[in-house]
Image (cartoon, rainbow, N blue to C red):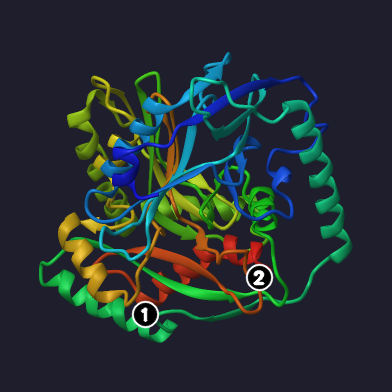
Amino acid sequence: MRADHCLAAPPRLSFRTHELPEGSLEGVALIDLLAGREEVVSWVHEGRGLIGLRRALTIEAHGDERIEALRAAWRSVIGAAWWRDALVRPGTGPVALGAITFSPASEQSSVLLVPEVLIGLDDDGAWLTTAVSAATGGVEPEHPDPEALIKALVTEARTAIGREHEDGDAGATAVETGALSEEQWCRTVARTQERMRSGQARKVVLARDVLARPTAPLATGTVLRRLASDYPSTWTFAVDQMVGASPELLLRLRDRRLTSRVLAGTARRRAGEDAPATARLAAWLEGSEKNNREHELARASAITALEPLCSVVNAPTRFVLSLPNVLHLASDVTGVVAGDTGALALVDALHPTAAVCGTPTPAAARLIEEAESMDRGRYAGPVGWVDWHGEGEWCIALRSAQLPAGGPGPHSPARVFGGGGIMPDSEPADELAETTAKMRPVLGALGVSP
């Protein structure tokens, strides 16, 4: 449903949230409920978060005002909705998950998706929210029985996991050239650097894509389970077939308190690296002039975007974030939001950050459009969720891929992305290796050997 149509005539939805008794998931992990499934959504971090099935509503928007259009349409949906929620905590009641394009010029749509079934888990326990069309005449619509629904989902998940174990490895996944070959991309980096040295930009984040083609069909839920298992400290997300394991929290808004994590400056880790080697690499990263300049530009852009919307903004000293495949320079920015500014308004203010675009933003965005020879779609765009009163959590869609409808297979490849911050003194070959390292999580989940 187009956002403008939704704003003018919002569908009437009924939501019902039930607290699930302890043990309802019978030891099945939250992400495992997606085993073998398509048409799923996911927002899982360290085993906690949200997963959903099927669609009760999809809102679409394009262009410069796409985020504001989605925000207004969601508010309209909430205004027309009816719900019961005895828990009233983050992620309960009406919730939509969203994926927004990097560029307003993208041919792909930006979306908010309301699942028919949403299951959440936090430190206080689990819950189930169902969404159905509201009946006319003020009659409360019928919702699925929560106990029967959860039992069926747990049983189906166990069956699917057992089938995956029986099938084993279906064979190697082929990787094909995307918009640019590796050689073409390196030449593009060098040409962009020439333009940067002429004063057109201080930093430009350039990305590339490859196509991953499994030899046998691979369920979206299976890809997500692999990502969550290998990279539990990231946010394992899925919205409208955009999937990934992002380490970068664009923002969390809860009780007017905002948290944002800025990642810029990267060092690649080698497989099997021991603790002393990792410590030496971290020390090198902390002392790297190029990486520190790159990080400071990204950190400054986030602070500049947030200060007009917050009564207080704090940005402690940056630190090194360790992930299985890379190390990042990281800064956690916190603030107190002024007035009733919601998560989507903050997303609109922050995107695109210097960490995924460059500095100055308009110049960097122009160079990206001219250099990359591709439409990024939702790669490096915001992805996350928003609830009925405008709060939620959003990441940047990194370590990600756009999967085809029905999941990737021999005739329908996944489009996998990786990018890096280009400075005037960057080495193109090093930047290429960085993009390859950043593709490794999703390529591994798709069955590509290391």
| Residue 112, percent from left and from top | 43, 44
Q: Which mark is residue 450?
A: 2
Which residue extends farthest front? 137
Look at 40% across and 86% down and name the residue there. Answer: 183
What SS does tag 1 mark? helix
Q: Quadrant of the C terminus?
A: bottom right
Task: Tell me the crowding category of disc 1: few under 14, some 14 to 19, or many 20 or more residues within 10 angstroms, Cα based.
Answer: many
* Relative to 328, 204 lies left or right: left
* Relative to 398, 277 lies left or right: right
Look at 82% across and 52% down and name the residue there. Answer: 161
Q: Amino acid at mark 2?
A: Pro
Quadrant of the rendered image containing residue 28: top right
Quadrant of the rendered image containing residue 349: top left
Q: Is residue 118 above or below residue 413?
A: above
Q: Amino acid at mark 1?
A: Trp
Residue 299 visible, this angle? no
Quadrant of the rendered image containing residue 121: top right
| Residue 43, percent from left and from top | 55, 41
| Residue 186, percent from left and from top | 36, 80
Of the residues under marks 2 and 1, which one precedes in the sequence? 1
Q: Which mark is residue 185?
A: 1
Task: Tell me the crowding category of disc 2: few under 14, some 14 to 19, or many 20 or more residues within 10 angstroms, Cα based.
Answer: few
Q: Nearer the viewer, residue 23 or 368?
A: 23
Q: Nearer the viewer, residue 90 or 108?
A: 108
Q: Nearer the viewer, residue 106 or 310?
A: 106
* Relative to 165, 74 lies left or right: left
